[in-house]
Amino acid sequence: MPTQDELLDILVIGSGIGGLTAAALLQQQGFRTAVFEKNRFPGGSCSSFSRSGYTFDAGASVFYGFAEDGLSGTLNLHAKIFRKLGVSVPTVPDPVQIHYHLPGGFSLAACYDRTLFLDRLQEAFPHEREGILKFYAELEDVYDILSSLPAGSLEDIGHLLRVCGSFPLKTGALALKTFQSMGKRARRHISDPALLHFIDIEAYSWALQDAVSTPLVNAGICLADRHHGGINYPLGGSGAIAGGLVEGFERCGGEMRYGREVSEILVDNGSATGVRLSDGSLIRARAVVSNATIWDTFNHLVDDDRYRIPMDRFIEAPSWFQLYLGVDASVVPEGLNVHHVLVDDWSRFSDSGGTIYCSIPSLLDPSLAPSGRHSVHAFVTDRADDWAQWERGSDEYRARKDVRTRELLQRLESLMPGISRGCELTLSATPFTHQRYLNRHNGSYGPLLRPGQNILTKPQNATPVRNLYLTGDSTFPGQGVIAVTYSGVSCASFIAAKFRRPIQPLG
């Protein structure tokens, strides 16, 4: 017989970074909040795990938002949130965001030093000097605007009026830039196909779309902030970010409920009233926040066809095939950077497996691997449909994983010669792995905007169901740890304002 638990103010489904951020800020504001997580650990794809003395990032490994420069705007959100929660998350700065290894032998490190980065890019494309400076100046303009505006919900009229009143010119300029494409702006200044390919991979490295399909506003965050706030790696691995949010949340009295999977969001007369857990328990709440994707929320958790989300409303991003490797330090060349993107052929860089991502975070934090060893995380895009013919755990499934592992290791030889022979530990994950652990539709990286869609058409935090809110990569501004952090701040701010307990802007 189902049991009914106590009434909560806020119930959060899933402990991804968006959900944890919203939960921590709401709990600190006096709302009785609980987070329900199916796994025994927090963080979703921004978590860490350990095997045989190695610690690996489950997914994300490039992090913005930790600079302590006193900005009062939307950037450096991690530093501001942890300061507000009274939590310390030590990090180490990384002088290079990503080192790109591209067709034709072209190699370029996107470094923290903006002048050095632009100088190297102009040396590679001397005939595009003026265009390079003009295009990257546009990204700098977006950064300047965003770094001046306080983070908050675009659905909160009071917040919008305050921002517009305090920053009328910058608000107007940002509104115009939301209609602009990164790639189309680049093509106003640059014509060299090879350089435009580089700008495409700059976008694809985090957005999984080429530059034309990437909003200029998103590019201003990821490609300009690296030269200001920089890239910082949390000591102990990516799970330290989730751990810090949990620490702050629990310090304020919030409750983490691990091993509690939500099977249904309860809706009564068009309003969310709580959830049903997989064991049949009913938990009531004044408001429910879903950190699941928009598809999993409305096509699975909400049992009402009126709220279904058509699969063609957005592009379904691919999932990943990932390798977690423990390797002998001898296979890592002296002076190698931490984060790399490798493209062999521009004609297939956006195809499944066409682009390799690789990180060696133990170069920054030696505690992630035994002495004389390194932790390596390498991954490529993949799709659940490509694995559907094999039953997970079957001999055929394992054989396919072995084939993919050997193929990826062979391609990594150009970066780390001898890696195929130097692996002490080899673990792999398919799209089914992501689907299983993260409860994400097809293990997908989430919904992507179609080319030409305005970034403001991305779902916001409110939904057609009263008292049901969304956070995470389905919502504005989109994919990436700093983006879902923003969505969590936005969600908490909107809910708090609705319940007349407004949260002060982060500073």
Image (cartoon, rainbow, N blue to C red):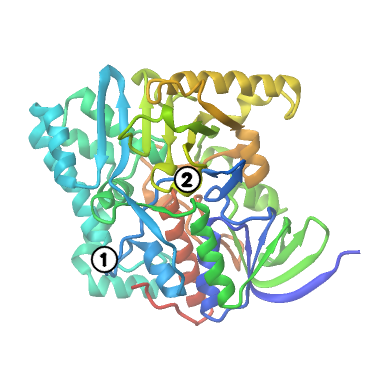
The amino acid type of the residue labelled 1 equals: Asp
> 203 or 152, which lies in front?
203
- Examine the rendered structure and indicate whether residue 8 appears above or below residue 269: below
Q: Which mark, by number, is residue 69? A: 1
Q: Secondary structure at mark 1?
A: loop
- Examine the rendered structure and indicate whether residue 74 appears above or below residue 62: below
The amino acid type of the residue labelled 2 equals: Ala
Badge 1, how many Cα within 10 Å: few under 14, some, many 20+?
A: few
Residue, disc 2 = 60
Q: Is residue 211 visible?
A: no
Lateral position of residue 498 relative to residue 365, left or right: right
Residue 86: percent from left, percent from top: 45, 75
Instruction: Write the residue at 50% across / 37% down.
Output: 317
Query: CA separation, marks 1 and 2?
Result: 24 Å
Instruction: Write the residue at 49% across / 53% down.
Output: 236
> 359 or 214, which lies in front?
359
Pick whichever of labels 1 and 2 is earlier in the sequence: 2
> 187 or 234, which lies in front?
234
**In the rendered structure, are the residues bearing label 1 and label 2 in contact, judged by CB atoms less than 8 Å apart?**
no
Lateral position of residue 40 relative to residue 379, left or right: right
Task: Quarter of the image for the N terminus: give it.
Answer: bottom right
Q: Residue furthest right?
A: 1
Q: Is residue 447 visible?
A: yes
Badge 2, how many Cα within 10 Å: few under 14, some, many 20+?
A: some
Q: Secondary structure at mark 2?
A: loop
- Examine the rendered structure and indicate whether residue 101 appears above or below residue 231: above
Residue 470: percent from left, percent from top: 55, 59
Snapshot quadrant of residue 264: bottom right
Q: Which mark, by number, is residue 187? A: none
Lateral position of residue 352 relative to residue 506, left or right: right
Instruction: Write the residue at 27% across / 30% down.
Output: 198
